Image (cartoon, rainbow, N blue to C red):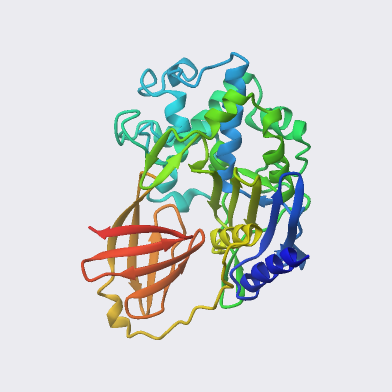
Amino acid sequence: MLLRRRMHALVGAYTRLGRFSGAVLVARGDRVLFTKGYGLASHEHDVPNTPATAFRIGSQTKLFTAIAILQLQERGGLGVHDPIGRHLPGFPRGDRVTLHHLLTNTSGIPDYVTTEGFTRVMGAPRTRRQLIDDFKHLTPLFEPGERMSYSNSGWVLLGEVIERVSGLTYDQYLHRHLFAPLAMHHTGLDDGRELVKGRASGYMSADGQVTPTPHLDNSNQDAAGALHSTVEDLYRCDRGRHRLLRSGSLAELVRPHVESDGTAYGYGCAVSPGRVESSGGTIGFVSISAGYESDDLFVTVLANVENAAFSDIERGLTAIARGEPYELPGGRVFVTVDPAVFDRHTGRYTMRYAGRTSIMDVTRDGDRLMVEVHGLARTELRPMSETRYFARMKGEVELDFRPDGKVTLNWAGRDVVASRE
């Protein structure tokens, strides 16, 4: 009872500050310690979030794509070290890029999501063929296997491989071989236009007000990030994964195959000693699921506000479950800054995380400082001082503009450095 009260107090504090809306679940082994919904799934219809609410889970989709590939390997339909040209004839460098390279983001294929202009086309439906045509002839970033650079493009290709090898659509395969066996009845793929019972809408939150996010047609995420799910279904997957894969395949799924910028990566998940994380961020939604081997702990946080403090909440819930120190959140204090100061910070910056280089444009718009990371919507940088700012984009971001022309970002709990070009 005390554990549940502490967890509720933590998540409730974030909710009251406008820093969370969604659902959480904490479990140890077969016992659910705490689960609850917070905020509204639909502000327009005053529908509350519950543990049964379905949220877009973004890149958590990649874990399910990886499981499907390993299943097909177990059944003899493919091998993870197959060149992709064996399954996708005619794809550039198809004799050198392997499925393993796609699964570990080491293919060198540029990420179509971070290309300039993606946000201008993301609302229109596109076929997988159109997505692939957008990136297949882009100049490779490096030779296959040379290093890691996070790329949604590779996961779109894996979705195509699943369809060609299985003879089923990606959606059909996942339902038949992953979701149905684990009774994950509220997980699936949709085009964003059909009615899905219990599905949350996506928002941005600012100063206690929420606004709907721009439309992202789900076809633009495909096997890289198009699934929706619930905290209850993700817990079912965590407990039942051994029913989907043999022990050897499970070990390959969570083995640290590659490391870059302090992040070790398995197949569709980040791994560190004793911890496996699957996280996602997409327009209007952020999410994280983390499993801890030593005490069989599972924590998942799904949010339908794009700037939710999802990683902070996961860490806090984990600390409470383990009897470790934690802090309740506080509100941020914003200040008024002479707009002339903003001119010192404007420019184009490059930053790298998980091996992927991203472009960040900082511009002045009258008396506001704005930021746009390619692949994300443009948003305001709100001053906490003349050099420290806060932004809402795929989680909470705090930025410190340094005298040396670099920017230190704390992005959803992760430290990143951006350099001005």
Residue 351 falls in image quadrant: bottom left
Residue 173 falls in image quadrant: top right
Q: Give left or right: position of 336 versus 35.
A: left
Q: Nearer the viewer, residue 27 or 392?
A: 27
Residue at 55% from the left image edge and 46% from the top image edge: 277
Please state, as top left, top right, bottom left or bottom right, where the C terminus lies in the image: bottom left
From the top left corner, tell me how far across and down residue 59 is, in percent: 54, 45
In this picture, is 300 found above or below 1?
A: above
Q: Nearer the viewer, residue 259 or 84?
A: 259
From the top left corner, tell me how far across and down residue 292 is, in percent: 59, 46
Q: Is residue 39 visible?
A: no
From the top left corner, tell me how far across and down residue 19 is, in percent: 58, 69
Please state, as top left, top right, bottom left or bottom right, where the N terminus lies in the image: bottom right
Q: How many marks?
A: 0
In this picture, is 61 found above or below 15?
A: above
Q: Give left or right: position of 334 versus 420.
A: right
In this picture, is 191 found above or below 378?
A: above
From the top left corner, tell me how far across and down residue 206 is, in percent: 55, 74
Q: Give left or right: position of 375 versus 310.
A: left
